[in-house]
Image: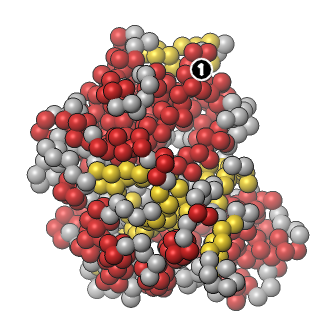
Amino acid sequence: MCVVDSFADVKILRYSVDGFEQLTPKQKFLLYYLSEAALWGREILFHQNGGDETILLLRTLDAIYAYQQQKGELDSRLALYTKRVWFCSGVHHHYSNDKFLPEFSQDDFNSWLAQVPNFDTLVGASAGYAASRLSKLIFDKDYKPKKVCLDNGVDLVASSAVNFYEGVSQREVEHFYKTRGANALNSKLIRNANNQLEEQIWKVGGMYSDAIVRIVENLKRASQYAENEQQVDIINTLIAYYEQGDLSLFDEYNKKWVSEKQSIVDFINGFIEVYSDPLGFKGTWESIVELVDAASSERIRLISENAQWFEDHSPIDAEFRKTQVTGVSMRVVNAVMLAGDCYPATPIGVNLPNAEWIREQFGSKSISLGNITHAHHEAAKSSGVLDEFAYDADEISRAHTWGRLADDLHTQLHECLGHGSGRMREGVTLDALKAYGSTLEEARADLFALYFMADPKMIELGIIPSLDVAWSHYDAYLRSGMLVQLARIAEGKNVEESHMRNRLLISRYVFEKGSATGAVKMLIRDGKHYIKIYGYQALRQMFGELLREIQRIKSTGDYEAARELVENYGIRIDAMLHHEVRERYQKLGIKPFSGFVNPRMSISDDGSDIHIDYTEAYDAQMLRYGNEYKTLKCQ
C-alpha cells in the first residue's frame, strides 16, 4: 500500500478490495450502483461544512487547478491549498477544526482566476464575482475561524462555521428541539422571512434535492441486483426516507439494516454522525460500500456471541447494564467505496445505528474495515514513531509482536460492544450532554475495550494468547494519548476533535491517578519525556472506574459532571511538552494524518461485468469527482 500523494500534514494511501474478482457479476453490479449512490452525495458534505461559499470555492479551485495543470504550469502554492480543501471538504482542518490559510496572495488568486478560459461556464459564476465572494473565506483568518467550536461559555452555533443553522442562536435551537422534536438529524434550522424558525428538510424536493435524487436513482438500480429480498426491502426503505424526509422511515431502515446479516455486500448511506454539529443534532452525509471478509471475522464472532457475558461483567452500575443484549453483530469488511464524511479520511471501524432506543431494542451492527487497517499498518511500519516515543526495548518488542492484534481487538471491542453497551435511565435523551456528548461516548467505548481486552475471558475464548496483547495496547494508548497525538495539534492550540479529546481525557485521568500510586510514571531521558507503566492490572482497574463514572454520566444525563470531566482532562495541553513532542515528531519527516484514494469502478464495454482500477491519482480523482458528480449551484 504505497503513499500516492503527500502535502501539508497528510499522506494519501491506496487500498485494495481483496475478493472483488471472485464475486459474481450480479454482486459486482450491486457494488457499482451502491458506489455511485455514494459518490453522488459528495457535494452535500462540502455544503454542510461551509454553505454556498464552499461550493463556489470548490468549483473555482477545480477550474484553476485543471487549467494550470493542463498548461504544465501548476503553481505549488495553489496545488497545496486545493489539495487541502479537497481533503477537508472545506477550509477547516479535518481534525483541529481550525481554518487554514493559503500561501498565495489575493492578487495571485485574482490573476489566476482571470486566466481561466470559459470560467463562467465551468464554475457557474463570473471570475469577478468569485474573487469578491471568496475573498474573506480564503484570506481572512477571523472570518469563520472554526468549523466546529466547542468552547465553554460561548454561543456554539454563532461560533461554528458549519451550515446547519442560519439566523438562530444556540438557545433558540436547543429550545426548538426540546419543545418540538421534529427532524433534527436531517434538516437545516433557519429563521424564515416571517421571523419564524423553520426546518429545511434534506430530501427529494427539499434541501439537497438534486444530489438526493441522484442517490435515489442509483439505490433503485442497486436494488435490482440485491442479494436477497431482505436487502431489497432495506434499500427501498432508505429510498422512501430520502423521498419523504421522515425520520421514522430512517428508524425503520436502521431496524431492518441491523437485522440483515447474511449478505456479502453491505453499505452505509445517509445523514448519520453528529460530530460536526456543536450541539449534536445534525448528521453529516456519509457512505461506505463494503464487502464482507468472512475469513477474517472469526474473532469478532466469538466476541459478539459472548456479548451478554461482557455486559453482565461490566464494571458499571447494575442499573445501567442491559438485562438482555439484543442483535449485537460485527464483521470484518473490505471497503469498496468511501464517500462524504468517510472520505478521504476514513474510520477504521463503525458501529450503527446511533439511536439509543434502536440499540437497546433491536441491537447494533459493527464493521471493522480490514483493508483500511491493513493500509495504515503497512504505512506505519517504517515511520520511526515507535522507536522515538517508546521508553524501552521491552515496550518496542511487545508492540512488534502484539501491536496489530491489539489494535484490531481494541477496535472490535470498541465498535461491537462498547458503543452498544449500557442503557439510559428512562426519560434521558442523547443530547443531554450537549457539546460534551460525542467525546464521552467515544471515551465510553474506548474504556470498555481497554477494560475487557485485559480480562482472562479473552484467553479463555482463544481470542488472545496472553495478556501481553492488552499490556502492549496499554503502552500504546497512553503513549499516543499523552504524547504522540499532540503532534497533530498546532502549538498554542487546545484539543478540539472529539476522538482526540477522548484519548487525552482517558490518558490524563489514569495518569493522574496512577502516578500517585506508582502504577504509571512520566520519565525523562536525554531531555525527552516518556510514559512508563509499572502496574498494568492497577491501570485496568482505573479504566474500569472511569468507565463506571462515564456510563453514569451518560445514563443520567449529568451535564455538569460531563463538562467538568472534559474541561479538566480532555482539552488543555502543557505547552512545553507539546513543543517537545512536535519537535521530535517533525524530525521523523512523516505526516501525522492519512487519507485514501478510492478505486475506480466501470462497466465493461459489453455491459456484462464491472472492472476495478487502482491507478488513479489523488488530484485526478478529485477533479473527476468535481466534474462528474456536480449537484449544487454556485450562489
Mark 1, other Cα within 10 Å: few <14 / some 14–19 / many ≥20:
few
Q: Position of residue 106 (x, y in %)?
A: 73, 67
219 sits to left or right of 12: left
Q: Residue at x 54, y 30 (%)?
A: 403
Q: Is residue 526 above or below residue 218?
A: above
Q: Position of residue 278 (x, y in %)?
A: 38, 56
Between 421 and 494, the one lying in front of the other is 421
* Residue annotated with mark 1: 397
Q: Residue at x 44, y 34 (%)?
A: 504
Q: Amino acid at mark 1?
A: Ser
Between 575 and 199, the one lying in front of the other is 199
240 sits to left or right of 103: left
Q: Residue at x 44, y 12 (%)?
A: 534
Can the viewer see residue 133 in this picture?
A: no
Between 94 and 451, the one lying in front of the other is 451
Corner quadrant of residue 82: bottom right
Picture mark count: 1
Corner quadrant of residue 395: top right
368 sits to left or right of 182: right
- Give the SS element for disc 1: helix
